[in-house]
Amino acid sequence: MPEETKLRERSEIENQWKWKLEDIFPTNESWESEFKSLKESLPRIDQSVRAVASPPDDPAELHDVVLSALNDASDTNRLLSKLYVYARMRRDEDNRAALYQGFVQRVEAMEVESGAIMAPLRPALLALPEGALESYITDQAFKDYDEELRRLLRDRAHTLSADQERIIAMAGEMRDAPSTIFDMLSDADMKFPVINDENGNPVEITHGRYGQMIESRDRRVRREAFEGLHDTFKKYANTIGAAYAASVKGDIFNSRVHKYDSALAASLAPNDIPIAVYDGLVEAVHSHLPALSKMLSSRKTLLGVEELHIYDLYVNVEEGFKLNVSYPKACEIVMEALAPLGEEYTGIVRRAISERWIDVYESAGKTSGAYSWGTYDAHPYVLLNYVEQFGSVSTLAHELGHLMHSYYTNAAQPYSKSDYSMFVAEVASTVNEILLSMDLLSKNGDPAAKRFLIGELLESFRGTVFRQTMFAEFERETHAMAERGEPLTHESMSALYRSLNERYYGASVTIDEAVNAEWSRIPHFYRNFYVYQYATGFSAAAFIARRILREGRLAVEDYKKFLSAGSAVSPIEALKLAGIDMSRKESVGGALDWFNELVDEYIGLFE
């Protein structure tokens, strides 16, 4: 293989393009010191929790004992998060690094140990004398924990005894094993084939390169990349099928021991999301499948193919416009697009770019994809695998949205209220993506540019609302199958996944055999019932972004209230601060109505 096709080692990448994790821990030795400190504090935390389990009779003394336990638990979780974020992000730089594999494993073991110590706290709090928790909720001394105590009272029926919760917490490392196995298989051990690129040069498929290949204008490259990636995952079908089945069974175990009707109900309950929201999303998307079919039928015509295949869905049919820009230029483009959010917002983004909060380029062993993450005690970070194409520009905007959500929340809320719900986690990122698209559309009167940009926006709808809802159906059904006692094998899951593809795409697309294995490469399935939130988040973001562009400062101020809310209010209430009520099915329907309008506008641009 020619040298130029190999991924660079991390040591070959300039420091300015690497994140500066020294802002979390200046050295590995300082990490070790804090790890040791936490380890040594566990006996004291245990005593603090046990004091609540054997409460004093004096109300004033009980008040102090409970407050001390809540503070100790919060401080422990805060330090655990800091330790884990650093360890995992160091490992993500190069998953082959044994040192940081060890760091991650040690923190995960510590999480299980500390979790077992703190697990009895919830049942102990619920066993306090009647009225005690209610009085603490209105007590100023407990202001950092008022929402936590409200949720605790709400979840009383699903909280077990102290001993039972301790045992369940001790099993946490085993419950995480399926996800860890998948990550190691996918990111470290799995090797993908070499195909020829558009110029006939041999190139190895990687997670990062696949995104480019599937958008190639050369249909052979798209097909070979699609088949090469999925055929590789298919070779590990039994292993991955067993890992995912174990993950599902772990979800079901957790739901049943905590007396929920289903794994879905258990997943939605902590954020107070009604099951009707999940089901309503699926119903709303089903009702708009004709609009998706209309979009895909036009794609078939525009590409001039007799049959449209799954690997044809990602390439933009417009050839007359490209946004293949360097990373510095991408930063300029994104900054301009975010200008409607004001100087305060864009000033923080500028710091993120200049102060090395972002890890930019792909390298050997680096975790694939992109994310934003961080710890309360340092600024948030972004991991990218940047390549010079529009998708990477959009990803930059997307991840900066996550970063800013965390930045505003951490600045406004105490640690105990800084962990905003996954239900709202994709809103800020998608607002940025939509603002980017709308800004570029406003600056490009060229019909080719409009066709390209609207095409990309439509693809965002397809990939985020339609595709993620299809994923959500897959999760809902695999869990339901297991709850009914039906076997989860790679054959049964592949058959289910194919049937969903036929429902969503079958009216316009030829469903290839290779797609049957696609479910096996989706890492988000190991975070149960997570993916539906991409679709609800996109729907909310479509409303918010368009409101910002219409109304300006007032909408921006409301949006910042949402960004700053954290878990101080429920996620449904947080979104209401930005002007949208996601408990209403019409909120998703409104976004999909816009999608239908965009499809008609897009088709008209080619006439």
Image (tube, rainbow, N blue to C red):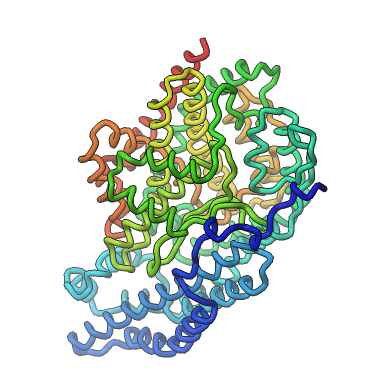
Q: Nearer the viewer, residue 276 or 176?
A: 176
Residue 154 percent location from the top left of the image: 31, 62
- Residue 560 appears in the picture as rendered: yes
For image coordinates 53% across by 81% down, the residue present is 29
Q: Nearer the viewer, residue 43 or 152?
A: 43
Task: Residue at the far right: name it.
Answer: 1
* Image quadrant where residue 576 sits: top left
Q: Nearer the viewer, residue 379 or 561?
A: 379
Total labels: the figure holds 0
Q: Is residue 467 above or below residue 301?
A: below
For image coordinates 59% across by 21% down, the residue present is 299
Q: Is residue 40 above or below residue 131?
A: below
* Image quadrant where residue 149 sits: bottom left
Residue 61 percent location from the top left of the image: 21, 88
Q: Nearer the viewer, residue 298 or 529?
A: 298
User: Could you tell whether 518 is left or right of 572 in the image?
Assistant: right
Task: Residue at the far top: name it.
Answer: 607
For image coordinates 21% across by 73% down, the residue present is 136
